[in-house]
C-alpha cells in the first residue's frame, strides 16, 4: 500500500472515532435545545449523553 494512502486511511479512521464518540453528546444537546428542557430533565439527558460517550470511548480503547 502506498504511504500516502495509509496516512489518508489513518486520518479517516481518527475522524470516524471522534464522531462516533461525540455523537451522543451532540444529540442530547440538540434535544435539550429543541425541546426547551430547563429542569432536571436537561441534566438527566446530558448525563445520559456523557455516559454513552464514555462507554463508546472505553469500548474503542479496548479494541485490538
Image: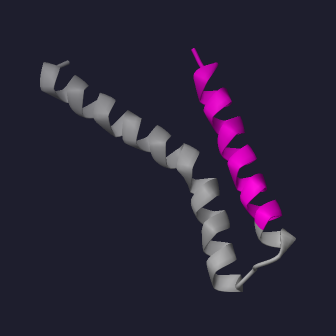
User: Vertically, is 47 above or below 34?
Assistant: above
**Residue lying at 19% horizontally and 28% vertically, measured from the top left:** 5
Q: Quadrant of residue 46?
A: bottom right
Q: Quadrant of residue 23?
A: bottom right
User: Vertically, is 29 above or below 36?
Assistant: above
Image coordinates for residue 56, horizontal then vertical, percent = 65, 38
Query: 13 or 49, which is in the foreground?
Result: 49
Q: Residue furthest top?
A: 64
Left/right placement of residue 26 relative to residue 38 reads: left
* Dominant secondary-structure state across the stretch colored magenta: helix
Image coordinates for residue 14, horizontal then vertical, percent = 39, 35
Q: In this picture, which residue range is highlighted in magenta?
A: 43-64
Left/right placement of residue 48 relative to residue 62 reads: right
User: Vertically, is 5 above or below 37?
Assistant: above
Image quadrant in which the C terminus is located? top right
Magenta region includes residue 49: yes
Magenta region includes residue 34: no
Query: 6 or 26, which is in the foreground?
Result: 26
Image coordinates for residue 40, horizontal then vertical, percent = 85, 69
**Residue lying at 84% horizontally and 71% vertically, measured from the top left:** 41
Q: Residue furthest right?
A: 40
Image coordinates for residue 32, horizontal then vertical, percent = 68, 75
Query: 22 or 46, which is in the foreground?
Result: 46
**Residue lying at 82% horizontally and 76% vertically, measured from the top left:** 39
Left/right placement of residue 18 relative to residue 64 reads: left
Amino acid at each position: 500500500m502506498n504511504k500516502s494512502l495509509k496516512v489518508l486511511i489513518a486520518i479517516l479512521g481518527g475522524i470516524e472515532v471522534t464522531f462516533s464518540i461525540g455523537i451522543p453528546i451532540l444529540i442530547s444537546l440538540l434535544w435539550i435545545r429543541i425541546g426547551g428542557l430547563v429542569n432536571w430533565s436537561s441534566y438527566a439527558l446530558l448525563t445520559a449523553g456523557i455516559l454513552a460517550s464514555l462507554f463508546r470511548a472505553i469500548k474503542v480503547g479496548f479494541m485490538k
